[in-house]
């Protein structure tokens, strides 16, 4: 049985007190930190990269869950692994050869994830079900924080979990975009086990927000 995991999205943190806020999420029970890398090409926004990852890696013992929203991400896999990425997720739509990119991640000793945008059919992940360690369903269009959850994502999560179960694969299924305390149970019910939340964690009392998420995740059957 896969463990339920909370991955607060650092994109929503206050960078003036970043180390302190990451520590708060760790102390309240969040197992991962979700690190969104955007290049301004694959997605419209530009976020942060390797120097920031190197800096925060020492601030917390949490798993560094690096989400590369960049064109041809295989170019940067070695560098992100060297800077402390534990999991590196690439976008299927951003790669000429997604399988080669996943191989490159494994060669660096990191866990490999693959993500799809809301408009990409779930079936396109089938060739990588054995190869990848984690699958990320975007429940908003990637590139901006604070968007509303796309309801059709629940069916996509269920479809992907079904494809994995048909093959006897216990893999992590991560969901990112518009997840709050009010809808996380639905996302878990659909088949996800790794929950990314930015605004839902960093807006307001961080410790309480994480504790409330962890209570739902821990009690979910």
Image (cartoon, grey):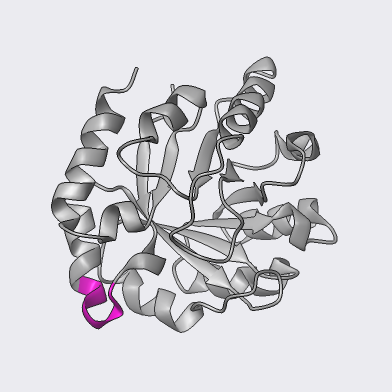
Relative placement, left or right, of 159 versus 175 is right
| 153 up-or-down from 21: above or below | above
Please identify the dominant SS of the magenta region: helix
- Counting from the top left corner in percent of width and height, residue 45 is at 58, 75
Write the residue at 63% across / 54% down: 106
Say which residue appears at 14% left-offset and 48% top-offset.
208
Query: In the figure, residue 64 lies in which quadrant?
Result: bottom left
- Residue at (54, 70) in percent of width and height: 37
Q: Give the range drawn in magenta.
A: 14-19
Give x and y (percent) for residue 201: 28, 54
In this rendering, the answer to whether 47 lies above or below 136 is: below
Q: Is residue 29 magenta?
A: no
Q: Is residue 17 magenta?
A: yes
At 59% from the left and 60% from the top, the residue drawn is: 142
Of residues 137 and 133, which is closer to you in this image? 137
Quick check: can you spot residue 61?
A: no
Q: Position of residue 220 (x, y in %)?
A: 32, 22
Residue 149: % across, % down: 50, 45
**Quadrant of residue 100 in the image?**
bottom right
């Amino acid at each position: 049985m896969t463990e339920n995991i909370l991955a607060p999205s650092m994109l929503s943190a206050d960078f003036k007190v970043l180390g302190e806020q990451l520590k708060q999420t760790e102390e309240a029970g969040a197992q991962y930190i979700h690190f969104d890398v955007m290049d301004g090409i694959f997605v419209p926004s530009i976020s942060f990269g390797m120097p920031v990852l190197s800096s925060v890696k020492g601030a917390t013992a949490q798993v560094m869950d690096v989400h590369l929203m960049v064109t041809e991400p295989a170019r940067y896999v070695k560098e992100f692994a060297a800077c402390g990425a534990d999991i590196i997720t690439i976008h299927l739509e951003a790669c000429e050869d997604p399988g080669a990119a996943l191989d490159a991640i494994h060669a660096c000793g990191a866990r490999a994830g693959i993500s799809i945008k809301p408009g990409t059919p779930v079936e396109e992940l089938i060739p990588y079900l054995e190869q990848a360690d984690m699958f990320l369903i975007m429940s908003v269009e990637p590139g901006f924080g604070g968007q509303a959850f796309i309801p059709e994502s629940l069916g996509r999560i269920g479809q992907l979990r079904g494809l994995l179960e048909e093959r006897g694969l216990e893999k992590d299924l991560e969901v990112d975009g518009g997840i709050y305390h009010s809808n996380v149970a639905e996302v878990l019910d659909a088949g996800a086990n790794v929950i990314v939340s930015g605004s839902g964690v960093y807006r307001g009392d961080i410790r309480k927000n994480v504790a409330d998420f962890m209570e739902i995740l821990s009690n979910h059957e």
